[in-house]
Structures are given as structure tokens and as C-alpha cells.
Image: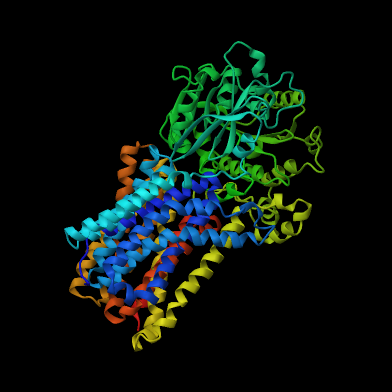
Amino acid sequence: MITKSMPLAAISAVSAGALAYELLLMRLYAVSQWHHVAFMIISVALLGYGASGTFLSFTGPWLRARFRLTWSANAVLFGVTAVFAFGLAQRIPFNPLEVLWAPSEFLWLGAIYLVLMTPFFFAANCIGLAFTHLSSRIGHIYGYDLVGAGVGAAGGIVVLFTFRPEQAILAVLGLGLTAAAITNFADGRRAGLRGLGLIAVISVMLAVAGPERCSTPKISEYKPLSAALRLPAAAIVAERSGPLGLVTVVQSLKIPFRHAPGLSLNAPHGLPEQRAMFVDGAGMSTIARWRGDDPDALTYLDFMPEAAPYHLLHRPRVLVLGLGGGEEVLRAHYHNAHTIEAVEADENVLRILRGSLTDFTGGRFAADKLRVHIAGGRSFLAGTDARYDLIQLPPTGVSPSGAGGFAENYLYTVEAFERYLDRLAPGGLIAVTLPLKLPPRYSLKLFAAAVRALEGFGGADPSKHLAMVRSWQTITLLVATQPLTVAHIAALKDFARARSFDLAYYPGMPRAEANRYNRLEEPHFYDGAVALLGPDRQRFMTRYKFDLHPANDDRPYPFDVFRWRSFHEKLALRAQGGMGLIDLGYPILVATLIQAATLSSLLILAPLIVLRGGGAVAQGRFRWRVGGYFLAIGLGFLLIEITFIQRLTLFLGHPLYAVSVVLATFLVFAGLGAAVASNLIARAPDSRTAERQAVLAVAVLALVGLGFWPPLQDALMASPAAIKVPVALAFIAPLAFVMGMPFPLGLAVVAARAPALIPWAWGINGCASVIGAVLAVLLAMELGFTAVVAIAAVLYLLAAWSFGHD
């Protein structure tokens, strides 16, 4: 029997599970591979939504005739496949580092897409079946879908505070089974009990299969953690998992760690015993054993480029942005700093250092010895009035996979340097250490950012405020609030000479002095620094093989140096080592967009074969207007949503808070907007007026937000989270509310004029979400966040035009 009612709570349960599963997969792939691979795979896995629309276009009548059974089956299959999909995908031998060497890797990538899209396919079938079966309640269905997704987005992050991702996936299974149980009980108690019995059997079988073991991430053999664990007698001695990452500490007794990048060959003493700390299997930092009984054990800290500022300052007040393994804190202690403070975003790092490693570190991270602020670096600086003599950014690198350019980072933008300068005492210094790359790119891009910041800092002449020290492996940039004096320069020369370091730049430096110890073919770093300080700076940056234009808060990608015009040249040199010159994150992102667009086009066009028999309306221009409308609003929704997540990362202090607040707010308030739209649909199912007004409202609010958000952010940046979170919610809510209306209003028009197009429209919206997720990042990297929101507004205006004409 076909019934025209079903508990909408079941729809919310499935949607919550799908969003939570998406977040959990991103964490699992961030651990097992790299962050940009996680984003790429999740984006294309969401093709399951597009595939669902195509599937329902072909099978809709048969499935609707057995609605209760097929809906429950899809809910159960969603939960079951969610448990095992990641484990199965890990068994596919895909290596993202070989995609430019071996095009066959894309075949393995396609196999991963197929596996990971399966749970999303079944979840989307549940929503799509509800749309077609209950077309009179489209607004309510979409509202419950979005509200459930918002709850799942927030819950997926919250659960990670307590459980590891592979454990939390069991909650996704529970949501799928719960949705099926709710639907079965709607048919009566007997049907519900039968459904519960079946679900109980499935649960027992899954428990025996050990789903947690299937979902445990296998860390790529190319990640630093895997390399460390391959050492004889290496073992994990501490580990904590949370939403911000998996923090792992490894000891190696037989072959001890000797990690000190850039250490001078003139260092008189060796290194103390070390343990290695990794975040998500990468980002290695070291924890040195020292109990205060052997001062010589820390001498090595003074023979690294990071020690340069301590030879220009006397007993400085030090702020370290990023605790890591604590090496910068130990260096400050060795140089008898007056005060030492550190800012660390992930509390799990501090818990490990103050927990099981207390004896190893001699208790130097105890609360009474070190003041640590759990916050984002920019957020902390905006909220403090303290002044420091030295702001130290610990050594940072770029993943060998090129993921560094892919991720936004607000610590190295022009505005960040301006904030650092503002928080320094007179005569203070900023110190940033980077890996040495040839030809120079990351260091020169940060140098350019510092130059831009200094130009706005009281009309300073940047050439007098900058210095760079180069070792054989690293380079340290120094930025001073006041012009470097003759005494400063003499101290810097003495420091470099005693350690056989090269001075890459200081005020008034002759070119011949730039290449004495660690000799290069040419003094590339000096030449680049001089060019960035000269009158032809723009011409130099335009002609350079890498993008050196400084990152800003609108384009916060300080390690994105990719340029298409030099890509083919570098690729042609891959046999001679040219692959090291390519940041793989960007081209892989473009390849993902091409694949997503290709597969989406096939999924969008395939149902047209079936829809040819759908009547004159389906055959006419209306069909193409339907496609254009849902593609435009789908792309626009994702462009705005992802941009707000990235923009509010700075405001809220960490990506965790941005994702949870922005995603949950967008989805929940969009769901409320969809509920209001359902009332409008009830009054006039085929009303174009309401649909056009909603779409225009989205465009207007998005554009208004472009002007209002930056000053609001600056005014409240220093406020506590108790104020910033409600402000962010209040700012997003009106826009999110109207963004929830165009889809159900447009779908109601389709239901009134061409019901056969409903699954197709649903599939187009899903495909647009796949394309939009990748496109948003690419556009932000190329044009900036402001331009992305403007493009989204244009898409909504095009959607209004699409349905406004027949």
C-alpha cells in the first residue's frame, strides 16, 4: 500500500548522518593521506547525490510504488555502506604523489570515487524519493533535510572531542538504522517491530564484522610518521585524537632522532635525546629531553638560524605562535628570555606535553613555568594589549604533496604582519623560519608580505627593517619595528660568521657578501629581496616563475606559488628533478574540478533520454531553464557557504569553530527558510513571484554582506567567543534563511508543470554541490573571497532570470 505520509524526522536522521559522515571522512583522509586529498575525495564522493538524481529518473515509478520498503532499504544501506566504504577504499592502491608521473593513478582514483559515493548515493535516494513521493510537502521535506544536516555538521565535530573518527562512524550507522526504524513504525506497531528485528540482526552482524577495525586509517607510507615507525624499535609513546587532528609522539631507542633542520656544522655539541611529534602523520616537530642538569645539551639551539633574533635582543619578552614540540620555548629559555608565552590552537598538544611526557621534559611545560594560551594566533593577538620584544613563528614547511598552497593560513598574510608589528615593543622583532627551496619561492613571498606590511607601518622604509639568514637547509626572515642599527647588523654578521651561515639580506648589504658558505650558483635570495624592495617590484613578481604576490586576508594562501605558465616547463623537467618545483595541490584540485564537471555532465544529461517521453513541457525550453536554475542556485549556495567558512576562520579563531558555527547555521536557518517556503507553496504551487523574490534576496544580502562584514570583523576581532559566536550567527542567519527558499520554491514550480523533472532537478543540485565545493577554493585562490561571493550573487541573479522567462 502506498501512503502519502511519513515521519519527517527520519529524513533529518539520514541527512544528519550524511553530513556527519562527510566530516568524519575528511578527518580519516587527512590522517591517512593529506588534507587536500581529503577535500578532493569528499567532493567527488558527493557525486552520489548527482547519481541519485539520475537513478531516480530511471527507476522512480517502480521505487515509488514500493515507497516504504525502498525508502527503509536505502536508509539501512546508507548506514551499512558508511561503515565499510572507507575501509574498502583504503585497499585501493592509489598514491596521490604519482598522479603526474602515472596517469593510471586516475583509474584508481575513480575506483575510490565509486566506493565512497555509495553511502551518499543511498542517503540521497532517501531524500529524492521523499521529494517525488510527497511533492506537495517539498518545502517541509527540504527544511527537515537541511536542519538535520546542520545538526549532523555540528554533531560530527562535537563527537570528535570524545571519539576517534573510526569509532564515530558507528553513530552514522545508528542514524541510518534509526531512520529506517522510524519509517517502519509509521506503518503500525507490527511493521515497526518487524523492522526493528531486521535492524537488530544487521547490527549484530556488523558488530561481529568489527566495523571499527575496517575504518581505522592506514597512514600513507610516504608520510613522516610512517617513515619514523619503520625505524627499528620505534614505538608510539603518546597519542591523542580530536577535531583538530591526531597528535602522535614516537620514540626510537635503537636509531635515535637527530632532527635539527639548518643546524650549523660548527655546532660544538650533539643533540639531546628527542622524541618526534606528528599531527595527522605529518608536520613533524621534536621534543627534547632536558631536565636542567646539562646546559651544554641545549647548545645546538643557538646554532640554528632561528636563534638569530636572540643575538639582537637582550632578555626579550617572547611570544611563540605555535607550541609544537616546544623547541622554540626551549630556545627562549636557553637564551634567558625575560618572559615566555606560547599560543597553541590544539589543546591535545599541551595535554601530551603536560601529561605523560612531563618526566621526559623535566616539567618545563608546567603551568607555573610557561603560560600557554589555547587559541588561534591572530585571535589571541587581537584580544591582548601586551607588548612583546620577539614574536616567533616556529619553522613551518610545505607538505611534499604540495598541500601547503592548498590550505588557507592567516598567520602569514600582510594583515598578520601588520598585527605583529602593532603588538611589538619599540625595537621588537618578528622571526619566521621556512625550509630552503630553490629557486626561492615561499621565503620571497613572505618577504613581499613583510615589505607590504612595513609600507603601511608609519611610512617605514622596508629596506631598513628587514634581514634574512640562510643555512644549508632553512632560511629565517627578521622583521623589525625600527630600522636595524649598525650594532644590530654587526651582531647579525658575528652570529652568521661563527656558524657558517649566509646573510641573504640586511640593510646596505653588498651582493658579494650573500654567497660565502653554503654556496649557490647565484645569490638568488639576495637578488630576489633587492628586486622586491626596488621600483620594479611589480614587474619582477609578474615575470617570476612562481607567484610571489603577497597573501592577504582576502586570499590567505601564503604557500600558493603555482603558476600555469611555468607548469609545462617544470613538468617537462620531471625526469631531471622538476617535480620538486611543482606544488601538486593546485593541479590536482583542477583535475578534480574537471573530473567532477565531466561526471556531473554525464549524470545531468543521461536522464534526458528518459525524459523525452515526458510530454511537451519536458521537451521544451522549460527543461533547460530547470537545468540552468538548479545548477545556478546549487553552485551559488556552495560558493557562499564555503567562502563564509573560510572567512570566519579568522574571526572565530580556528577552522573548527568556523565549520561548526557556519555550516550548522547555514543549514539550520536554510531549513527554516524552506519551511516558510512550504507555506508559500501551499498558497500558490506554481508562483514564480515568490521564487524570484527569494533568489533576488539572496543576491542582495550576499552583496550587502561584502561591505558590512570587514568593518564588523575588525571591530569585534578582540571580543571573547561568547560574543563572536552569536555575532557570526546573527550575521549569517538572514542570508541562510533566504538561501533555503529558492530550491523548494523552484522544485514546486517543477512539480506543478513537469513532475517527471523532479529527480533530475535534485540530481543537478547534487552535482552542483560537487563542482561548487572545488570551484570555491580555486576561485578564492585566484581571485579572493570577495570575488567568490560576488560570483555567487551573479549566479543567483541568473537563476532569477532563468525562471522569469518562458
Work out which quarter of the rendered image holds the N terminus and state it: bottom left
Above or below, 81 against 248 in this view is below
Which residue appears farthest toward the top when viewing the image?
A: 293
Query: Tell me, what colour scheme is on the image?
Result: rainbow
Question: Does 463 appear above or below 638?
Answer: above
Where's the C terminus, which quadrant?
Answer: bottom left
Image coordinates for residue 688, horizontal then vertical, percent: 28, 76
What residue is shown at x 50% (from left), y 62% (from top)? 114
Q: Is 310 in front, or is 202? A: 202
**Direction bottom: furthest residue:** 616
x%, y% of residue 273? Answer: 63, 21
Left or right placement of residue 56 versus residue 770 in this view: left
Q: Position of residue 366 (x, y in %)?
A: 46, 19
Left or right of residue 53: residue 471? right
Q: Is residue 220 above or below residue 112?
A: above
User: Can residue 694 be seen by looking at this rendering?
Assistant: no
Q: Is residue 207 above or below residue 743?
A: above
Q: Quadrant of residue 672?
A: bottom left
Residue nearest the observer in this picture, 787 or 748: 748
